[in-house]
Image: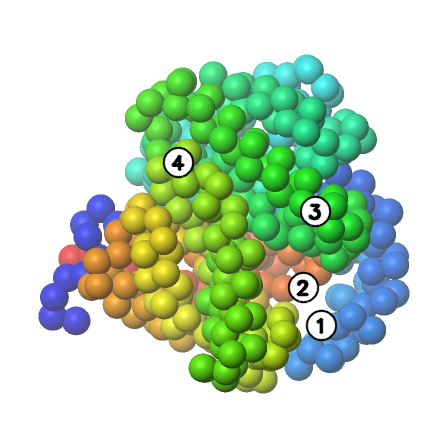
Amino acid sequence: MDKRVFPRDFMWGASTASHQVEGGTVNQWTVWELAHAKQLAKTAEDRLGWLPRWNKIKNQATDPENYISGKGVEHFSRYKEDFDIAKKLNLDSLRFSIEWSRIEPTKGEWDEEAVTHYRQYIAELQKRNLEPILNIWHWTSPTWFEEIGGFKKRTNVKYFQRFVEKIAKEFAQDITYVITINEPNVFASFGYLTGRWPPQEKSVLSSSRVIWNLVIAHRRAYKILKTSNPKLQIGIASQLANIQAKRPRNVFDEISVEAMRYVWNWWFLNRIKHSSDFIGCNYYFSDYYTNVFKRENPKIPVSDLGWYMEPEGLYPLLLRVWAHYKKPIFITENGLADSEDKYRRWWLEETIIAMERAISEGVDLRGYFHWSLLDNFEWKHGWWPKFGLVEIDRENDMKRTIRPSALWLAAHIKELMK
């Protein structure tokens, strides 16, 4: 393009999450993994046999070890190496999460060595001029917190509040950006409504309690953090979808779309809009609805996970988010499972164009964080989905290899920011 679109202070980064990359975590997810790995492997073909690449992932998906996070990708010990790779990719920021179970492994007892680790982690980012974007909670909790009911009980929010106070005390003066909670809508629905994730409940009441308690948790966290450092910029990372009618102007399709947009995209954000400095948008999906809440997406193209891919759908979504809230927006996650690196460059190209269009129309878009910097443990799916800009060979000493699409992105960022 002849005219610069991205502002000079636009942030180009990638995202990670502690449980998915660090290794050696002990939390409610690791307990669930160990208890369900054999069952997940046994039922893999029933759950995943429809995927286009099933024959290529079958051996891994039917192996119980696939479903155990274990050593992760050793990011806990190799983070300096990973930060150096991020710099090679011309990134200037990194979103990461603090592992609550490391900081407070036993109720009321802080692990100061873990605190020191994350302090050094932040310092090493800043040493490389990588802006640290601290995510306080990315779905994993200490086992003791889960045993007393987790976020399903209102009285337990005080324990999260205490954790946030510790984070504020230790780190708030050294950073600028904080995300309190990652994808509260996904956590509440998958863990407590559909039963796909731990604790595998299927209860409208339980999911409603959890999502409301997460609203309260965010509001309290915002006050604590702002009191500690008024200059902090605080928000959440919400999973937002580009929800469209399969048949535009069909009354049933349009009603379904408006309802789904409200419930999935806006309900949580509406309740924290006065305690958020920015909106974090995790974008993966364009979903098409028909009749009464029936999702009917196109069959191609799809990612390795079978997700319909429409990266350009980010553009209309950004316009809607901006129209609703008029707050700065960060794309806090965006990517695809693509082990052969077949579609990632296309995805990135279309995403950049979508961002340029949105910025050109006045959307205050401040940054882009690709999911993920590294191949990681993808929750219930385990290790076979590959989201990383950097390939991790877990069978060969966790060897890091930059994918061709990431090299293209690095060169394109350099060109865009001249």
| Rendered image: mark on residue 384 | 2
The amino acid type of the residue labelled 2 equals Trp
**Mark 3 / mark 4, whichever is N-terminal:** 3
Q: Mark 3 points at which residue?
A: 207
Q: Distance between the residues labelled 3 and 4?
A: 23 Å
Provide residue 336's location: percent of width, then percent of height: 52, 66
Q: How far apart are marks 4 and 1 (CA)?
A: 45 Å
The relative height of residue 237 versus residue 321 in the rendered view (above or below) is above
Identify the secondary structure beneath mark 1: helix
Q: Which colour scheme is used?
A: rainbow
Identify the secondary structure beneath mark 2: loop
The amino acid type of the residue labelled 4 equals His
Asked whether the beta carbons under mark 1 and mark 2 sit within 8 Å of each other, the answer is yes
Provide residue 97's location: percent of width, then percent of height: 53, 38
Q: How far apart are marks 3 and 2 (CA)?
A: 29 Å
The relative height of residue 111 versus residue 297 in the rendered view (above or below) is above
Number of residues whose C-alpha sits closer than 10 Å to that of mark 1, classed few (under 14), some (14–19) or many (20 or more): some
Left or right relative to 313: residue 355 = left
Q: Looking at the picture, tell me which residue is in the foreground, 127 or 40.
A: 40
Tell me if residue 161 can be seen: yes
Number of residues whose C-alpha sits closer than 10 Å to that of mark 2, classed few (under 14), some (14–19) or many (20 or more): many
Placement of the N terminus among the 4 image quadrants: bottom left
Q: Mark 4 points at which residue?
A: 274
Q: How far apart are marks 1 and 3 (CA)?
A: 32 Å
Hey, which quadrant is residue 307 in on the image? bottom right
Identify the secondary structure beneath mark 4: helix
Left or right relative to 97: residue 44 = right
Q: Mark 1 points at which residue?
A: 57
